[in-house]
Image: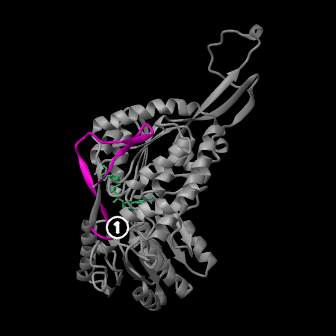
Amino acid sequence: MIRIAHWIGGKSHAGTSGRVGPVFNPATGEQTAEVDLASAAEVADAVAVAKEAGVAWRSASLSKRSAVLFKFRELLAEKSGELAAVITSEHGKVLSDAGGEVARGLENAEFATGIPHLMKGSYSEQASTGVDVYSIRQPLGVVAGITPFNFPAMVPLWMCTTAIASGNAFVLKPSEKDPSAALFLAQLWKDAGLPDGVFTVINGDVESVNALLTHPDIAAVSFVGSTPVAKYIYETGTAHGKRVQALGGAKNHMVVLPDAELDAAADAAVSAAYGSAGERCMAVSIVVAVGEIADPLVEAIAARLPKLKIGAGTDPNSEMGPLISAAHKEKVAGYIAAGASDGATVVADGREGDLPADGYFLGVTLLDNVTPEMAVYTDEIFGPVLGVVRVETYAEALALINDNEYGNGTAIFTRDGGAARQFQFDVNVGMVGVNVPIPVPVAYYSFGGWKASLFGDTHMYGPDGVHFFTRTKVVTSRWPDPGTSSVDLGFPQTR
Ligand code: NAD
């Protein structure tokens, strides 16, 4: 049995807590490894190493930090195939999709190579007579990232590239379900010349998360995962004086107006609903069909489903792999049953059909006539289940989205530029696609939802990432002629 250890001080570090968790290959259902689950004491030891390393790293010049990022980017690009294979082996997503995840993470490394520009402050000469005022950005110290199973490389890359480039030491607590991608990244950082201790991986579960949330030397916590945990992380971390950004779950609606291009909308709905078996926070889980397009749209989506190839992620012919675990597969299957008994029309049932015998495979499900009271509408299912809600007007479609608890992503499909622009103006969601079903922002914008999809006010990566991992200091400076100095107890004014 492979043992997956921590990464502390620039090398693999076997756990001492005596607690381990199982890691499975979701395509076969076999346990392939066990991962160390850190105790609070192990977390404290790792943070101490990171703290010491962070002091020196903070002093490294911007060009030195940028050079490490350039090298890291080069190595990540070179080894993207290997990393994709690691992701597929523990997550299950198909290799092309795992490659896409790495490619999007690579963009974050590219963005962070520009750190000398991103860290620039501002300077006001002669703010008062003989007085200059300027701002500088400084790193926070030791910062932590706590990440979900569904993007085991990309989400850590959202965080660590900017955090490290900004001069922080970064401690990653990846998902215990697929921890190996994090250790792959650790080796790349080392090979890129990052000093030991600046990037740490601490494997674990709730115990290690709580240890990070309460440790006095952790200055900030960046979290991505489900909404209940995101809320807990935000509340606990901020109660312990930390800066926290906690991204939560989603229920993304794709509105299809009557004038939309039917085939393009159907292709987009299928791709965005079933890609990565629906285990994406930007997956489309609800199509809102407006007016007379509903019948032809449901028909067009249904016609595409039998052609989807479901199989092991390592098979180049597979388009959709298994779910992450046996328990999650059962949960998703339960939602299909609930949808049927609540009165949704089951157009395609993922529990039926030819699926690989082993592993956590589920077919694709299409539920028509879903209504807002049903559990398949209210809950984030996080599986290959697409619901269709039928409405008569744009206003009803908009109200559905704005009344929804979540506000991560949304999309509108239409040929009407005015309608799309109105939607962009009206909708209470953080990321909006116009004829684009999965509008994940490019690395030089920032990623984040609204409402229950984000606790905190700062989005992930891009300019917001630099803001989150740095704090500004404003210096007011005078180099007076000693002859003009005098005591003045008045409040400072500009003159
Ligand atoms: P999760 O919330 O179960 O786990 C996320 C992390 O939190 C893991 O590292 C896990 O070990 C830890 N954790 C789990 N339970 C905890 C608890 N009770 N206390 C403290 N820590 C705990 O999420 P997941 O199942 O790994 O990932 C899927 C979820 O993540 C979905 O809800 C999805 O929408 C969301 N997600 C959101 C985004 C986004 O950008 N908004 C991106 C990806 C995934």
At a point 39% along the width and 54% down the height, the residue shown is: 180
Which of the colour schemes (rainbow, by chain, secondary structure, one colour) is used?
one colour
Judge left or right: residue 97 versus residue 3.
Answer: right
Compared with 366, 405 (above or below) is above
Image quarter hosting the C terminus: top right
- The furthest residue to the front: 1
Q: Is residue 324 at all visible to an observer of this figure? A: yes
Q: Where, by quadrant of the figure, is residue 128 drawn?
A: top right
- State whether residue 217 appears in this view: no
Q: Which quarter is ligand 1 in?
A: bottom left
Q: Quick one: 237 or 429, which is closer to the camera?
A: 237
Residue 326 is left or right of residue 470, and the answer is left
As helix, strand or loop, the secondary structure at mark 1 comes to: loop
333 or 408, nearer to the observer: 333
Residue beneath disc 1: 380
Question: Quick check: is 477 in the magenta stretch?
Answer: no
Residue 21 drawn at (x, y percent): 26, 53
Which range is magenta?
2-29
Q: Is residue 24 magenta?
A: yes
Mark 1 residue's CB less than 8 Å from ligand 1: yes
Task: State whether residue 335 is above or below residue 40.
Answer: below
Residue 84 spot, x, y in % from top left = 47, 63
What percent of the width, then of the height, locates residue 490?
A: 63, 17
Mark 1 burial class by Cα count in 10 Å: few <14, some 14-19, many 20+: some
Query: Which amino acid, by three-letter code, is at mark 1?
Result: Glu
In the image, residue 311 sits, relative to residue 79, either above or below, namely below
Q: Position of residue 111 (x, y in %)?
A: 61, 52
209 lies left or right of 414: left
